[in-house]
Amino acid sequence: MQKKTFIIANWKMNMSVNNANKFIKKLDKLNYKKKKFKEIVICAQFLLLPSLSKISRKNILLGSQDCHHEPQGAFTGDSSIDLIKFFKCKYVIVGHSERRKYHYESNHLIKKKIDLISIKNLIPILCIGESLEERKSKKYKEKIYGQLNESVSNKIKKLVIAYEPIWSIGTGKIPSYDEISEISNLIKNFFVKFRKNCDLSIVYGGSVDSLNFRKISEIKNINGALIGGSSLKYSELKKIVSSIN
Ligand code: PGA
């Protein structure tokens, strides 16, 4: 069976309401060969979601970039999973390295978020990956194994894992295809052995653009990409879409 490819855009804290609306309307009109695409997801910052959710879309799904681990309560400044769902998100990114770095998110906290997202029938996109020091000192496998083990429980039925080496995010440096392949096999084996009941997809993230997207997506056990910087440029995203169409 031909493998189906995810394109997941992580817009981070970018885009105005007007530009985001225009972008999605245009992107939705591209001609998608449904057999080849798994899903095309735009993960936008919270305040764009109400407006984006009103746009009628045939091809593009929405996702958020985080959520709180409790359903509601006294958590000033946070956003709840129910509102994320109300504004038509199907996916939620969790554990992005920028959240781990700037908001000190631990695997323990990320596990609670994944549990809540799954209970609400949305799909978590869990970001994992090693730092440059961990890669150089050959501790990267341990790190990734620990992130999986501590944040994904046996109860999770559907999950996307984004392997995003921290040193590759926004730097233009990507691991070799063999290195990506090694990690995607490690992730796959972990699930086959320890989390058998989970419907898993693995994507790669970190400096993905229209030149490297296709080759990366062809790696065994990789089902597409989580794309930051390049997903903000319409012409780039269009080229990425047409590279698998
Ligand atoms: P990048 O970001 O594509 O700009 O490297 C990816 C990400 O942070 O998800």
Image: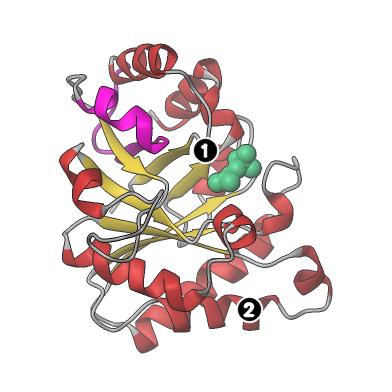
Report if the beta carbon of the residue with label 1 is closer than 8 angstroms to ligand 1.
yes
The residue indicated by pointer 2 is 143
Q: Which residues are magenta?
A: 30-53
**Where in the image, quadrant-wise, is ligand 1 located?**
top right
Q: Residue at x 35, y 54 (%)?
A: 67
Q: Identify which residue, 40 or 13, lies in the foreground.
A: 13
Q: Amino acid at mark 2?
A: Lys
Task: Tell whether 150 sits left or right of 167.
Answer: left
Depth-wise, is mark 1 or mark 2 nearer the camera? Answer: 1
In the image, residue 122 sits, relative to residue 197, either above or below, namely: above
Which of the marked residues, 1 or 2, is nearer the chain's N terminus?
1
Q: Residue at x 61, y 70 (%)?
A: 182
Q: Residue at x 29, y 18 (%)?
A: 31
Q: List the single residue furthest toward the bottom.
A: 193
Tell me the quarter of the image containing the N terminus: bottom left
Q: Which mark is residue 44?
A: none
Examine the structure image and report whether residue 66 is included in the region drawn in magenta.
no
In the image, residue 47 sits, relative to residue 127, either above or below, namely: above
Asked whether residue 36 is in view, the answer is no
In the image, residue 23 sits, relative to residue 97, either above or below, namely: above
The residue indicated by pointer 1 is 12
Tell me the quarter of the image containing the C terminus: top left
Q: Identify which residue, 236 or 72, lies in the foreground.
A: 72
Q: Residue at x 43, y 69 (%)?
A: 110
Q: Residues within 10 Å of mark 1 (few under 14, many from 20)?
A: some
